[in-house]
Amino acid sequence: MRVTAFVALFALGSVALVGCAANPDVSGLASELSTVDGVNDATVRVAHSGAPWNTQLVVRLYLEDPSDAGIVEAVRGAAPVFVADDEGSRHEVSLLFIGGQRSDYESDFDAESYKLTVTPDICAALGVPDSGPYLLRLSPAQMREIADGE
């Protein structure tokens, strides 16, 4: 009986892990985003919302100009970088915007306390739905549209 239970548990565990995959390498993406005009620095981390196969990229952009116009220009400048990147072009991206330099903050966690507000006007200027006051959530298709200037 114990052997049967062990085999069943092992089989169930194997099936459950089928969706697990290694996190994609996003270090190059963070470096590229840091070179966009108006972006002082960038961090990218991988998240798996709800299940291991649901991959999203969570991106902090540290901006030179924290105004609405500065956010819009940073997104327009960053969109082609996401589209050209193997991982950035395949996954949903959640963008958080923080004014200043990354070095202005004790940690990235501390910096998130100073997130800039993503206003409905910013979303309208980019042609995307409002996804909340503190982040801009973009699908790969929306990112391509922004990169194409649509």
Image (cartoon, helix red, strand yellow):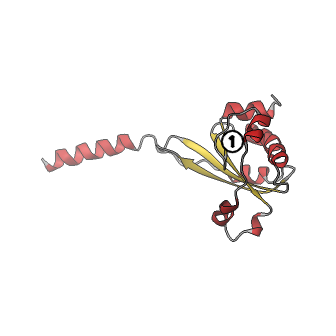
Q: Is residue 15 left or right of residue 135?
A: left
Q: Quadrant of residue 64?
A: bottom right
Q: Residue at x 78, y 34 (%)?
A: 146
Spot occupied by residue 93 in the image (x, y as percentages of width and height): 65, 43
Residue 35 position in % (x across, y down)? 83, 52
In the depicted structure, whether residue 144 falls above or below residue 43: above
- Looking at the rendered image, the quarter that the C terminus falls into is top right
| Residue sitting farthest toward the front | 120
Q: Amino acid at mark 1?
A: Gly
Instruction: Name the residue located 81 percent from the left edge and 30 percent from the top edge.
Output: 148
Q: Residue at x 68, y 41 (%)?
A: 88
Q: Extreme left residue here?
A: 1
Judging by the rendered image, the residue that carries numbered circle 1 is 88
Q: Residue at x 51, y 45 (%)?
A: 49
Q: Is residue 84 above or below residue 23?
A: above
Q: Residue pushed farthest top?
A: 150
Q: Residues within 10 Å of mark 1 (few under 14, many from 20)?
A: many
Is disc 1 placed on a helix, strand or loop? Answer: loop
- Picture coordinates of residue 20 (x, y %)? 47, 45
Q: Position of residue 44 (x, y in %)?
A: 67, 53
Taking 128 as reference, is 17 left or right? left
Residue at the bottom extreme? 106
Looking at the rendered structure, the number of numbered marks drawn on it comes to: 1
